[in-house]
């Protein structure tokens, strides 16, 4: 009779066939390769950090007060916001005290798959007549080497969010130079979300903390920033006025082009999901705006989407389904009285419109400078406005939906006065500076350099 304990032992012993053995060997090999690749990537990053530290240390060690000419590098990833920099760039080009370099960058907006659109950014700069370098290397750190070779005294970046651009152009890589920003928005007027790190990234990001100068609309804006940035108390913010306010403020009373019909400018924000500031309403209002355009063939409708909303539409990011997006474009483009504004030079769009229908955010303030009415498609759960924001938003007509918006728009088209006209004029007065913001920015830069010993 067989030994039962020996039999049970053999039954418990795993049977390893050649096929199983090969699969195990392959699995171990692939796991080993993955670990080796991960380790190599970590080593590459360590080597890069070490090299970056050495390069930065070398530049800081030899850094001195700028020579007679100050080298300024503008890094551009958001040509839709070029208005904020255009006049500053123009003044510096004409000033013998400055050597100006502009470079186009790839970008990553919410919803995008990787960094892209450098060709679009470059094309828009060409359209604006701006000579520029193109930083589009497969390895962006090679472009960072070019920046180090240029050795700028000042680097102007368009936004504080490092995530919008490749890591090679992050704050940590550029702080060997004096970092500056002219914000693309006139001012921040919502209560900012504090991240898990405890930072208010809209006003107190790593970029802000390392910045040499951030230029803002006025002393009142700077005071509110100081209250929200205890680490720096807005020491790096300089009240100069905003160049964009000068451009848009000049549109008050400006006549539209000949042949103009009543025109609705419709702007849609990208925060359509449940994340971040939650102003975007396109998932519900997009189809309804098509219906309004269809119902009013005597008017023209211009759709201007935030660039990040277009990215989300392309990627069908929730709640923007593929069917919703496809149906919208099909129906919108089929109408004879609709068009799409591609972004960039939008002063003419403002001048040739009669009313703005908008769900947020920056145009709610900016359009008030034109002297035209604003209708705010207000999402119930949006991030609240700051105290200064409540004053700004007093100048717009707040409505819960498209139907209510167009009851008002129809009245305006028939000649009715804007119900928020008086408040809108007060908002414009708050935002409008002395009309020389760009000149003030250039003067402030020179004054700060002179404080460091610069002579010219």
Image (spheres, rainbow, N blue to C red):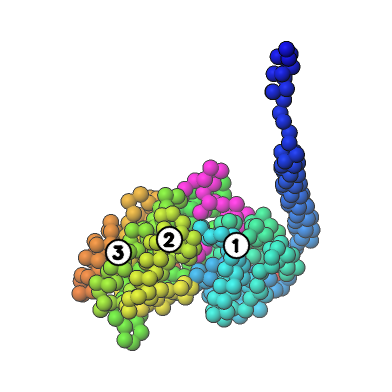
As for residue 197 lying within the magenta part, the answer is yes
Disc 3 on helix, strand or loop?
A: helix
Q: Mark 2 or mark 1, which has the lower sequence index? A: 1
- Between residue 93 and residue 351, name the one nearer to us: 351
Query: Percent from the top left, x then y, of residue 371?
Result: 33, 72
Report the residue marked by disc 2: 322
Are the residues flagged by discs 2 and 1 in contact, CB closer than 8 Å?
Answer: no
**Residue lying at 48% horizontally and 73% vertically, measured from the top left:** 344
User: Which is more foreground, mark 2 or mark 1?
Assistant: 2
What's the distance in space between the residues labelled 2 and 3, CA to CA? Answer: 17 Å
Circle on res. 288: 3
What's the distance in space between the residues labelled 3 and 1, CA to CA? Answer: 33 Å
What's the distance in space between the residues labelled 2 and 1, CA to CA? Answer: 22 Å
Magenta-colored span = 183-212
Query: Is any atom of residue 282 visible in this view?
Result: yes
Query: Percent from the top left, x then y, of residue 278?
Result: 40, 53
Query: Percent from the top left, x then y, of residue 93?
Result: 61, 78
What main secondary structure does the magenta stretch of the protein show? Answer: loop
Relative side of 183 to 50, left or right: left
> Does residue 133 lie above or below 365 as drawn?
below
**Residue lying at 77% horizontally and 58% vertically, measured from the top left:** 55
**Residue lying at 39% horizontally and 61% vertically, measured from the top left:** 323
Relative side of 277 to 233, left or right: left
User: Which is more foreground, mark 2 or mark 3?
Assistant: 2
Quadrant location of the C terminus in the rendered image: bottom right
Q: Residues within 10 Å of mark 2 (few under 14, many from 20)?
A: some
**Residue lying at 54% horizontally and 46% vertically, measured from the top left:** 199
Circle on res. 115: 1
Disc 1 on helix, strand or loop?
A: loop
Quadrant location of the N terminus in the rendered image: top right
- Between residue 444 and residue 393, name the one nearer to us: 393
């Amino acid at each position: 009779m067989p030994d039962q304990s020996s039999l049970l032992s053999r039954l418990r012993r795993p049977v390893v066939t050649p096929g199983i053995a090969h699969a195990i060997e392959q699995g171990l090999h692939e796991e080993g390769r993955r670990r080796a690749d991960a380790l190599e990537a970590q080593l590459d990053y360590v080597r890069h950090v070490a090299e970056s530290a050495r390069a930065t240390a070398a530049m800081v060690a030899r850094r001195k007060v700028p020579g007679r000419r100050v080298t300024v590098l503008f890094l551009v990833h958001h040509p839709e916001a070029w208005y904020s920099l255009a006049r500053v760039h123009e003044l510096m080009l004409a000033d013998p005290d400055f050597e100006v370099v502009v470079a186009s960058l790839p970008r990553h907006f919410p919803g995008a798959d990787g960094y892209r659109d450098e060709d679009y950014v470059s094309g828009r700069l060409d359209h604006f007549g701006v000579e520029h370098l193109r930083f589009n290397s497969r390895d962006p750190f090679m472009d960072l080497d070019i920046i180090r070779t240029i050795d700028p005294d000042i680097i102007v970046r368009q936004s504080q969010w490092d995530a919008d651009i490749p890591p090679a152009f992050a704050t940590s890589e550029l702080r060997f130079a004096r970092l500056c920003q002219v914000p693309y928005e006139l001012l921040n007027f919502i209560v900012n979300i504090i991240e898990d790190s405890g930072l208010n990234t809209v006003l107190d990001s790593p970029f802000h903390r390392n910045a040499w100068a951030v230029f803002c609309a006025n002393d009142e804006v700077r005071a509110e920033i100081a209250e929200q940035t205890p680490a720096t108390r807005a020491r790096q913010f300089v009240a100069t006025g905003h160049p964009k306010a000068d451009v848009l403020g000049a549109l008050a009373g400006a006549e539209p082009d000949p042949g103009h019909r009543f025109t609705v400018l419709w702007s849609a924000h990208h925060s359509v999901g449940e994340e971040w500031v939650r102003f975007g309403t396109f998932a519900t209002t997009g189809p309804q705006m098509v219906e309004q355009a269809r119902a009013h063939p005597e008017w023209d409708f211009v759709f201007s989407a935030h660039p990040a909303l277009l990215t989300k539409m392309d990627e069908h990011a929730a709640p923007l389904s593929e069917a919703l997006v496809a149906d919208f474009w099909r129906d919108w483009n089929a109408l004879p009285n609709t068009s799409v504004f591609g972004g960039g030079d939008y002063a003419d769009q403002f001048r040739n419109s009669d009313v703005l229908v908008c769900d947020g955010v920056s145009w709610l303030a900016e359009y008030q400078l034109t002297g035209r009415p604003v209708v705010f498609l207000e999402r119930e759960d949006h991030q609240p406005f700051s105290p200064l924001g409540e004053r700004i938003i007093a100048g717009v007509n707040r409505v819960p939906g498209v139907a209510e918006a167009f009851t008002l728009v129809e009245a305006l088209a028939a000649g009715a006065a804007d119900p928020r006209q008086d408040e809108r004029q007060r908002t414009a007065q708050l935002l409008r500076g002395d009309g020389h913001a760009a000149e003030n920015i250039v003067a402030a830069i020179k004054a700060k350099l002179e404080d460091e010993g610069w002579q010219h």
